[in-house]
Image (cartoon, grey):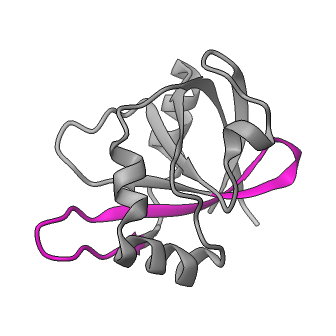
Amino acid sequence: MNVVSLKGKVFSGTGEGQKYVRLAWVKKQIEQKVGFTPYVGTLNIRLTEESILKKRLSIKGSPLQIVPAAGYCRGKLYRALLSGGVEAAVVIPEVPDYPENVLEVVSSENLRKKLKLNDGDTVELGIIL
């Protein structure tokens, strides 16, 4: 198993990730492709400069795909592990100008509560390739 370790800081998003994960067809595809029902909401992580470069160089492989319903964007989906071995997945919406330094992380649980995270806390995660 090839794992790319990335680091960043937790921040509050705009709620768009939550709306996306709430869509029945997105939820179903995440369940089918990574094996868990996602909690409705995402953990937003702003990557460090070093992690942005690592991400750019290493996760170009073949991600799992979220195939959109009409009028919605595609998404890339990567299996991931957070600190302490918490199973998760990274969702990267394929929209113009989506920030390269942002990761949206989903899990079966509320990650902020489970890991006792607040805005500004540093987290590490491994993306499984």
Left or right of 42 on screen, residue 129: right
Magenta span of residues: 65-88
Q: Is residue 80 magenta?
A: yes
- Check the image and name the residue furthest to the right: 84
Left or right of 102 on screen, residue 43: right
Residue 70 drawn above or below residue 52? below
Q: Residue at x 35, y 57 (%)?
A: 20
Residue 50 drawn above or below residue 62? above
Q: Position of residue 118 (x, y in %)?
A: 67, 22
Name the quarter where the N terminus is drawn.
Answer: bottom right
From this viewpoint, is residue 81 visible? yes
Q: Residue at x 42, y 50 (%)?
A: 18
Residue 105 drawn above or below residue 40? above
**Rendered image quadrant of residue 76:** bottom left
- Residue placed most toward the observer, 124 or 61: 124
Q: Residue at x 44, y 34 (%)?
A: 102
- Check the image and name the residue furthest to the bottom: 32
Q: Residue at x 65, y 78 (%)?
A: 35
Q: Position of residue 64 (x, y in %)?
A: 47, 72
- Check the image and name the residue furthest to the left: 71
Name the quarter where the C terminus is drawn.
Answer: bottom right
